[in-house]
Amino acid sequence: MAPGWSVMSPESHLFQSFNGLQQLAETRRFKAWFLDQFGVLHDGKQPYPGAVLALEKLAERGTKMVIISNSSRRSSTTMEKLKSLGFDPSLFIGAITSGELTHHYLQRRDDAWFAALGRSCIHMTWSSRGAISLEGLGLRVVDNVEDAEFILAHGTEALGHPSGDSLPMTLEELEKILEQCAAKKIPMVVANPDFVTVEARDLRVMPGTLASKYEKLGGEVKWMGKPDKIIYQSAMSMVGVDASDSIAVGDSLHHDIKGANAAGIPSVFITGGIHATELGLGNFDETADMNSVKALASNYDAYPSYVLPSFTW
């Protein structure tokens, strides 16, 4: 079994030893587990070794599990993706994605900020991954910044066209458009706050990178997902539990762990995800040096309750 540790607090230098996910689950019987997917359950191409079994073991204990993901796609698409990778959708109560939250807020407009947003948008989307549909939102996609009332960032590969097609663009080309938008002072909605994600051991740039660039240009950004506590609150509401009975599992200190901190939820940091290179890890399930983990957590101002190499029973 892989070793793990408990980080007592941001100021603490004490680490409680665990023998992995199984002992954690037996020691702390959380009613609900909120699970990130990329970097925890799979790498976008295949499940991590032991991840399917770990989910089955948690389910046997009556644990309620919810996927909470910064995916810019709808929750139903996320569940379909998990099924295609060999995960049993029936093990989960459901999924909440930042894309689902974005769709909800843009459709309902019952939030004052979204009500004032307007309907014409510059749409930054995917190309190789497949562009994201805006059906049912009543939006008008424009390709001229002068006609836009806001930016909607679903991806980092293409610019949506009024025809419904997408025009592939480099990150640099999209950033040039952001400069024009910043000069016009229009807001951005980012439907995936991740900066990067794990994809078959490589890192792919995600919409959060564009949003961070836009903030540096002086633009206003509405972050629809982790680390904002909105997605954790939605997960707790879905399951009907409070923070003390929940635990969040993720591989990103800035998004998963910092978001759990903001929501007051205990968390598990999986070191073998997007921070593996920073922690000097080369192989799956390799144990990170705890001094390195502490230093990295301090750099991100994000403090996990527990640290594990992988989501393995």
Image (cartoon, grey):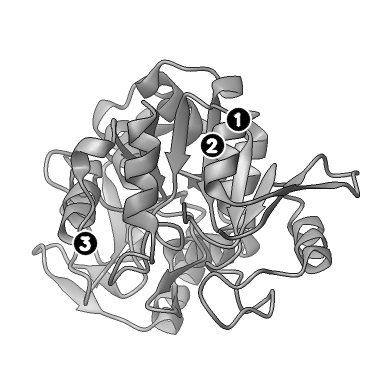
* Rendered-image quadrant of the N terminus: bottom right
Nearest the viewer among 181 and 282 is 282
Q: CA distance from mark 1 to mark 2?
A: 5 Å
Label 3 vs 2, first from the N-terminus: 2
Residue 152, image quadrant = bottom left
Q: Residue furthest left?
A: 163
Residue tagged by mark 1? 28
Specify the quadrant of the image occupied by residue 282: bottom right
Residues at marks 1 and 2 touching, judged by CB atoms closer than 8 Å: yes
Q: Which mark is residue 283?
A: none
- Residue designated by label 2: 25
What is the secondary structure assignment of the residue under circle 3? loop
Q: What's under tag 2, amino acid-wise?
A: Ala
Mark 2, other Cα within 10 Å: few <14 / some 14–19 / many ≥20: some
Which kind of residue does numbered mark 1 sit on?
Arg
- Can you say whether 89 is above or below 275 in the image? above
Q: Position of residue 272 (x, y in %)?
A: 55, 68
Image quadrant where residue 46 sits? bottom left
117 or 272, nearer to the observer? 272
SS type, badge 1: loop
Residue pointed to by mark 3:
85
* As drawn, 10 above or below 251: above
Residue in front for this viewpoint, 184 or 41: 41
Total numbered labels placed on residues in the image: 3
Specify the amino acid type for callout 3: Leu
Residue 47's place in the image compared with 237, above or below, is below
* Residue displayed at 21% across by 62% down: 85
Residue 90 falls left or right of residue 2: left
> Mark 1 and mark 3: span between their CA atoms?
29 Å
Q: Nearer the viewer, mark 1 or mark 3?
A: 1
